[in-house]
Amino acid sequence: MTTAAETEADLVKRYDEVNIWNVGGFVSFADLVQGGQHLGSGVFAQTESVELREGPISAEQTALAMKGFAEPPWFAAAMERLDGRVVFLAGEAGTGRRTGALNLLQRYTRSFDLRAVEADADLTVWAAGSTQARGYLVDGLLDARVTGLDAIALDRLKAELRRADACMVVVVRATPGILAHLGDTLHTEPVRAVPPPSRAVFEAWLATALPGPGQRQAALAALPDGLLDEILKPHLAPAQVVEIVTEVVRTAKGETHAGSLREHLSFTAADRAPQLLGAVRGSAEDLALLLSTCVFEHFDHAIVEEEAERLLALAAGRLHVGGWEHEPDAPSAAGGFAFARTRRERLTAIEAYRADEQVRSTSTYSYVTEPVAFVRHLQGRALLEYVWREYREAYGLLVEWLRQTPAADGRADRAGFILGQLAQWSSGHRALGPAEELARSDRPGDWRMAARALGAASTHPVLATAIKARLRGWSRSPVVARRCTVALACATEFGLARPETALQLLHAVLTGPGEESATVETAVRSAVLALFAEEANRTRVTASLLQWSRSQSTPERRAACATVAQLLRAAGPSGEAGEWWTRHLLSDSGLPPGLELIRTALMEPAAFETARTALLDWQRRAVTDPLRARVMEHLADRLAPHLRGGVLRLFTDLERAQPAPGSRKAAQALADWRASL
């Protein structure tokens, strides 16, 4: 998955290398665990994607929800209730509501044609349209939208679903007001979502992680006697149970010691946060290192220490508590005695450690990192939330420190994500204030950080409505900073969870008031690259690009052509993206949109060179790839009738490459053209 901090070149490079944008490198806040029976964390689940909030839910996402699913006690009753077309599923966050709802819809409809409906949807006027979906999921319908329903509107909704031969699961909060409205006004008894038994989740996930019975027996035998019974409490959330499974598997693989399993679990992170903060409040250096580790956990230790020193300098005494002052000769990590304390001692004081060396690679060189991590999972998140909620005086300092984070090494991207998390822990109409200030800046780096913060904050359903309203307003602003922020936000969780809304916003950014801006067009291209990287979005993105390419608006047409050229370049290496283009161009469904887009990109002066270079690279690779060879022959056939401008120039290059695929047909087309002169 992409981040707003990435440039267009970064996006293309990553697309070249891995062909997907993975949430593990995108929602990178230290071990952030999301609800349900699945984890959304950079440590535990590197292959999960952003939870879709609108539009078709991919079969892969539904299959992921089905993986290791333990049927909760309410499941059978909910299956029966779906005969009435609509089920309200009421429960607390973290009880597995979304995972259960997806399994419920798939099991009832026996179909993977499922669709997400945004949490702020007005169900009194909602219509299925021509989507052909069999099941609809409304995850976290806003309270105001629930209470806006009456019995007549609910009957209309059910009739609409019957017409579409579909059903709907509406996930709501289990508050007294919502439950009373469902029962007294809608005369509908909600299904109360309670988590499945901890032991059932454990066994289901362990069987998925270690399929062999012998493997599971060996893994359990390696645990200290009684440990599993002690930690596998009945009240655990499904995500916490999966965390236990993950640690058991790590132990089985020799990645960690069985005796330390309990120390890693996040269950006590929230309770431990005040104690840990209290233990270091007497030392400004330790406090700075603690906060830096909370934000930059899993970064190299040198970066964590640099950021701690930057915070200490910026604080200018504000990290001292209650008039406490340093003794005149007290050692300081930022300067003082050369042998005051070792790194190990300083990290031990904040219950963190340096992990084993890891080798990271760029396109030109490799390097070694020693990441810093807390012993306990989610400790950084819990401590930051505690500081943010309980120490109002720290608000300004934290925001100031994060906003000034340098872009190097991905630090600004992480800082933007943390600002989004802080917004989720805030209340009042100014929760998005720091992000809005960044969006008003004249520095592109600040726009990227603002977009990153808005993306992270948008996973909160209430904040998402405010973010959507702001982005819609900014997309029509004549101010470049605002329009760029909108485009960059479409490459974050916000846009990836709402691809249809993202494409609408990007179109508005291109066609809105204000002067033409190369910076805006670059930001739009980056966002479209991010959306296109998700295979489920490609048909939708291709249709939008085709519409833009046919527009009379120069920025719209130019952005479409330049984006197509970048996508062609990114699809050059063999891999998933190249395979998609191959299937698309060789499809039997008439004239594929991609073919017209390629021709238009070749005819656009600003996009020609990139498109030409990409297609010549395709031709070189086709020499040893029979399927790509078919694509090149097909392209030469379909482009031959349009032999002018950029297409003509491409054909002269293809001709020179004889006997490479496509060159013979290009030569024949050129010969016919010359004969007609």
Image: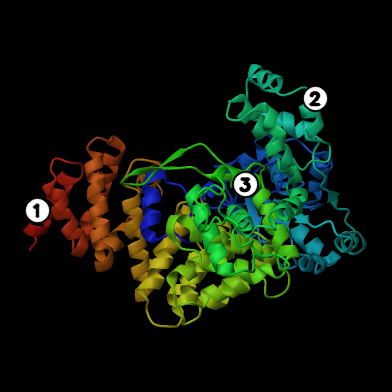
Mark 3 sits on what residue?
Answer: 31
Q: Which residue is the extreme one toward the front?
A: 329
Foreground residue, 347 or 86?
A: 347
Spatial CA distance of label 1 from label 3 is: 62 Å
Foreground residue, 422 or 302?
A: 302
Characterize the local packing of mark 1: few (<14), some (14-19) or many (20 or more) Cα atoms within 10 angstroms. few
Spatial CA distance of label 2 from label 3 is: 27 Å
Secondary element type, mark 2: loop
Q: Position of residue 77 (x, y in %)?
A: 84, 42
Checking the image for residue 226, the label placed there is 2
Q: Residue at x 24, y 67 (%)?
A: 605
Going by the numbered disc 3, the residue's amino acid type is Asp
Residue 546 occupies quadrant? bottom left
Q: Position of residue 26 (x, y in %)?
A: 53, 52
Q: Residue at x 69, y 58 (%)?
A: 282
Q: Residue at x 39, y 70 (%)?
A: 521
Q: Do tag 2 and tag 1 residues touch (Cβ < 8 Å)?
A: no
Secondary element type, mark 1: helix
Is residue 279 left or right of 503 when viewed as pictured? right
Going by the numbered disc 1, the residue's amino acid type is Ala
Mark 1 sits on what residue?
Answer: 671
